[in-house]
Image: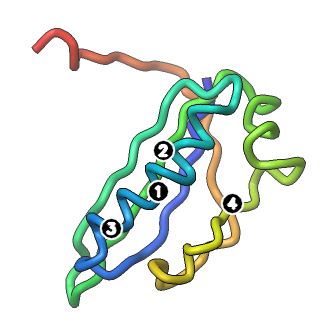
Amino acid sequence: MILRRWTGRIRTADREAYAAYIAGTGGDDYRSTPGNLGFQMLFRDVGDGISEVTTLSWWRAMEDIRGFAGDDVDKARYYPDDDRFLLDRPEKVEHHDVVASVTTLNDR
């Protein structure tokens, strides 16, 4: 399994609107791409009205990520209204091989 990680910054006041926007753009694209195993969106307030947003998506293989991202899998993918929300647009994402995974969410 491969984890794809992207991080950017938004205004804290835009958190709810940005979450809804991403659910309908990147989230829909993740779910409709074969080989995607799910995604998560995380927010972290960093002060001065700024929040960091991170998306984590989980994939079976790099070839599946190519189906989502194109040939340059390390290049971040953006959507038409991103400029409305994002304070910066990092060019690259990170990919990590998942070598261990334990989930206990369903046990609670």
**Residue type marked 2:** Leu
Discs 4, 1 touching: Cβ within 8 Å: no
Residue sitting at x 77%, y 32%: 62
Per the model, the C-alpha gap separating discs 2 and 3 is 19 Å
Classify mark 4: residues with Cα within 10 Å, few (<14), some (14-19) or many (20+).
some
Identify the image quadrant of the C terminus. top left
Which disc number belongs to residue 77? 4
Q: Nearer the viewer, mark 4 or mark 1?
A: 1
> Which amino acid does the dot numbered 3 rest on?
Ala
Looking at the image, is mark 3 or mark 4 earlier in the sequence? Answer: 3
Q: Position of residue 55 (x, y in %)?
A: 47, 51
Give me the C-alpha separation between circle 4 and circle 2. Answer: 13 Å
* Chain-order first, disc 4 or disc 2: 2
First in residue order: circle 1 vs circle 2? 1
The residue that disc 3 covers is 17
* Residue located beneath label 1 in the image: 22
